[in-house]
Image (cartoon, rainbow, N blue to C red):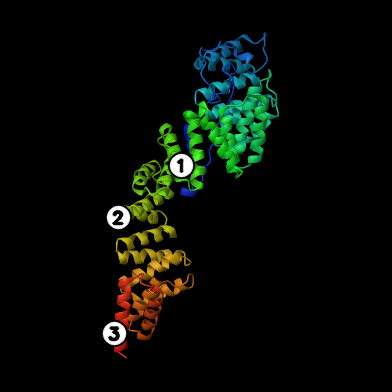
Amino acid sequence: MRNNMRNNRIWRRRCASALGVAVAAFWMAASLPAQNQLPPGAEDPDAQPAATAPPAVPRNDVARPAAPLLDPLLAQAESAVQQNDFSAARPLLEKYLAVHAGDARALYDLGYVDEAAGRQEAAAADYGKAIAADPRQFESRLALGLLLARESKWEQARQQLVTATLLDPEPPNPAAQAQAFRALAELDRSSDPDAARDALLSALRLSPEVPSDLLLTAQIAEAKGDTQTAEQAYRRLLASPAGAGGETGAEASGGLAQLLLQEGKYADAEPLVKAALAHSPDDPALNAQLATALIGEGKRQDAVPVLEKLHRLEPQNPQVQRMLADAFVQAGQPDQADPIYEDLVKANPKDEEAYAALGRNLLLEKRYPEAEEALGNAVKLEPGDADSWSGLAFAATQTKNYQDALQALAMRAKLLPETPSTYFLWAISYDNLHRKKAAEEYYRKFLAVAAGKFPDQEWQARHRLIALDQTH
């Protein structure tokens, strides 16, 4: 669960420049000591394992005041929960609640049992009933907020967590309160980084700093556009024992790598991404980062297998498809790019960029009639695409559709200044349509700016001017 949520969040945050993907997610960084028992999924991911297992603590000494006069049936149920014997605990709790339907403590217990069994909807309902029975019960607010966050119900989760931060657990439990603040900081770090910073500071007033706090500090700074602070926090985490490996270290490597990629420091980013991939080899975001780094370093052939893997991981992602196709083109394999571009235009006939890319690729393969059709579709969808008008003009001269070439050149001329190449296309189009004066004019314009950079075309232009002069 945590891996899936983490992948979604990083994919959205770190690959926007390469993929443009908008996906939201949440990952909870807890810091409760081992003796505090909270809902499933709320354990501290950064805590080091103890040398010996801590002594078992009765559940009623954890989430609420000790109750020496506790009903024997509820006490038996909580003892079963403490031993993780949830199948035994459930009927006992149900029997107790049949008589004490409004007991918030027992309802919280039932929610815990349901959540541990993977019955998320039932657990949410149980926690909701506990809150209705006792609106000031901290434990159910926190448990429900974490559960809703794991189900991507952000606003509902935030409401519960905000309320939890305003309540006091019984008995006092600073670590549990800090967990609520950390969860709130995670939810707010992109949408309201200032509020996230304040929530994290509140957590640090209640409990010691843990490695995941450094990660969250970096992410909040990144959301605020403070790349210097973000980079410092990432590097500090990576220099710590917790940053040497594991999920937190992988996230820090990926986060720092993204900052370096944005700065164009591709060679510095590559080893960081590879280190993160050693922990999470199938992380789409990290694979996208590695491909971006390799392409930025000019290692196009090395980028292709990375992008092929990324395509297998995200087969329906159009941004991934486009990246892979572009990499094939840059690696000199346009034939491999064709089916990908064709799939893109079939999936979205209104995708002008896909038609334009397909058209350019077909030009490389000298498949001029098909290129003319693809580029024609591109300019219909986006008449302001000057590059597609240029490609269309060239394709039309190769298919001897010279009138179409002139129309394409005229549309391009409204968008960009002329170049030696466009002057030459004007000239040969007019020449083949037997419009001699116009052809002579553009051959001369071409020769005036070619400056020896196009020897074959310059030779052709001079000889055509001689031939045209002889026909006067």
- Say above or below: 188 vs 375: above
Q: Using the rendered view, name the quadrant where residue 107 is placed.
A: top right
Residue 381 seen:
yes
Residue type highlighted by circle 1: Asp
Number of the front mark, 2 or 3: 3
Q: Nearer the viewer, residue 252 or 299?
A: 299
Q: Residues within 10 Å of mark 1 (few under 14, many from 20)?
A: some
Residue indicated by mark 3: 467
Residue 9 seen:
no
Q: Is residue 394 left or right of residue 14?
A: left
Q: Secondary structure at mark 2?
A: helix
Q: Is residue 320 left or right of residue 52?
A: left
The circle on residue 268 is 1
Residue 333 rendering spot, x and y as whole percentages: 31, 53
Residue indicated by mark 2: 335
Number of the front mark, 1 or 2: 1
Residue type highlighted by circle 2: Asp
Q: Mark 3 vs mark 1: which is more N-terminal?
A: 1
Residue type highlighted by circle 3: Ala
